Image (cartoon, rainbow, N blue to C red):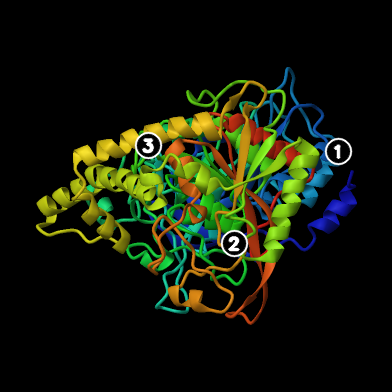
Amino acid sequence: MLNWLFIVGLFSSFVTASVNVLSTDTIGTVLNLSGSPIRFLSPSTAVALGSVSGRGAIPSTLTPTTCIHVKHTPITMEFLESQLATYAQLDDVWNDKFLEALIISYEGPAMAFFDDEAKRWLDALPTTHLFISKSIQPPSLENSEVLTISTIPPPGPYFISKSNEKKQLAIHHVYRLYEDDHHAFLFGAIPGPSGGWVATNITFPIEDQDDIPPQQIPVPSRLPALLSPNAKPLSGARFGLKDIYDAQGLPTAAGSLAYALTHPIPNITATSIASLLTLGAVMVGKTRTSQFAHGAQPWEFLDFPYSWNPRGDGYLTASASSSGSACAIAAYDWLDFTIGSDTRGSVRKPASLVGVYGIRPTTGALNLTGVVPLSEEMDTAGFFARDPRLFYAVYKLWYQGSPVISRQIGTRFPQKLLYPIEHFPVKNAEAQALYDSFITSLQIHLGIVKTPVNMSSMLALYFPDQTFPAFQLSSNKLAEYRSWVSVGKPIVDSFMEQYGTLPTFDPIPVKMFARAQNISEADFQASVAFKRGFQDAVSKYIFPPSPQSCSETLFIYDSAAGGKPSYRFEEFNSFQGAAPFLLTAPSADSTPPEMKDYFNFLASMAELPEVTVPIGQVPYWSQITRRWEMLPVAAQLVVARGCDGMLMELVRKLSENGVVGGVKTGRLMY
């Protein structure tokens, strides 16, 4: 316990936190506190109003405040200190400048009081106003006004000020503004006064007028949710939301200005996201996506510029449609997880390239009502996380009750690891060494034995004409036809009706929509029928079910560029040592595509669950920074349809055994 003399010294250099207002609009006031560069948002709508009694004056301007709930009497310095220490440990929004005012409440059978040591402690703080609940005896303090307040907010930081009513205190939430310097977000969001959200769109001028000012993302304190007696399983966890999911009150653009112009702001939230919110998670803004979740290279993002991958030299690609969510989770400590979607690799590939955990669940795992579709036959809702424990926890909570995920409790993991000899070894020998070590760990810790196979040949037996190009064409038809019929054509029709001209799209949707108009309903249905047959064959012959392990086999591959750097600018991929990144279309040369380069199609077409597991990083020489940088390496793990639970248990077990672990934000994973 700190003694009160130490507390005097601790705050002796504290200057009363005068508020410096930076801007004010209908959303609220953006400000910082004297002596601190940290910016905050105080929403214009108060979270609570409290009647105040006592002789002291209520602060007339916004005042940073800390609320503490007390459970025992007498109220001691030791307890108050411990609460502030907890606040500092749990929260990145609260700091000691919020001690300018205090709200202290007590709920108990009798009147509470401060002991003498606590009174001296309070007088040593830079607190100008102490508000107490009616169940606390007012202490006699030399340096603070003491008033009684009728309404007590949850524990945590707030801004308070005098309301329009006499002797009434307005209590406002606090949001810390974090700069989105990697341009992963479209805008931030805070809860609206009557439900849903309000887009914040807060920016500050920057020196280079040709650049787009980064968004300032408002992040709430974790304390009110974490310390609430009604805390939920994910209370305090913050996430970013890919902008193909509807959120009440926020525009959905799906990467397209034309889509935003032809669709009203949603008045409901996507079903899958609503269920996540009921678990206590907090959405802080919408992340960028390629148009309509199509696979596009970074230089093909036109309406909304591409996000920046923080890894390595800062110029690496993060793949396609969920790249905004992937870049955000790899860049920002203040985010806990981010939501993406995966049709043909849009969670798995970005997760691999930024070195985080990601999941594509079994198709149908979550309800996708309120999500802009790409291909209803292949679309899934997935997410990214840096910590394997949180990755597991979010999975268990968000996907609970899924109609397609098996609830079978196995007694072991799959015994056979399908190791594609045509795919391995990867291009970088050091990356291959990481795969070899990881595979050895699978055998040592989980009893999974490496089984070399030619996976392409095994799968080709179930392809049209037994060729991958024919298989890929069938998959393309599913995505192109659905995207045009469900999204593209309605936009074109609505845009023509409203504006009298055709809308413009990014290059990839232009190509896909053009091809889609030559796909008949019969062609589409033939592709649907093929997919069902392929799914059945894969489930029977490649990933047979097992009563002991759910899936008899586990498949591993690399969804990145073989341990080589691949860049966000097309011309950079001609650098020595770089490797162009393959999405869902053949490379620019005339070489026919091969299955060994597109194993991401397997889970999509067979409806299999797949996770991305970061296993390390390898050095590469950057032609940009002219120094050695580090590149993420990740393993893709695939199991039988519905065996998501077993696959996540496998990740959890590897984490417990120290085979995999959490990754950091920024240039380096570790």
Quarter-of-image position of residue 268: top left
Left or right: where does residue 353 sit relative to residue 365?
right
Disc nearer the start of the sequence (1/3) = 1
Circle 1: residue type:
Asp
Where 458 falls versus 505 (above or below)? above
Q: Front-most of 97 and 594? A: 594
Compute the Cα span from label 2 to label 1: 67 Å
Residue at the disc numbered 1: 116
Question: What amino acid type is highlighted by mark number 2?
Answer: Gly
Residue ID at (27%, 37%): 526
Q: Which mark is residue 562?
A: 2
Say which mark, if any, is on residue 531.
3
What separation in Å lies between label 2 and label 3 (alpha carbons)? 28 Å
Q: Position of residue 434 (x, y in %)?
A: 72, 56
Q: Amino acid at mark 3?
A: Lys
Q: Are the residues at dot 1 and dot 3 in contact (C-beta closer than 8 Å)?
A: no
- Label 2's element? loop
Q: Report the residue at 80% width, 43% height from top.
A: 81
Residue positioned 62% across, 38% down in the render? 554
Q: Is residue 406 visible?
A: yes
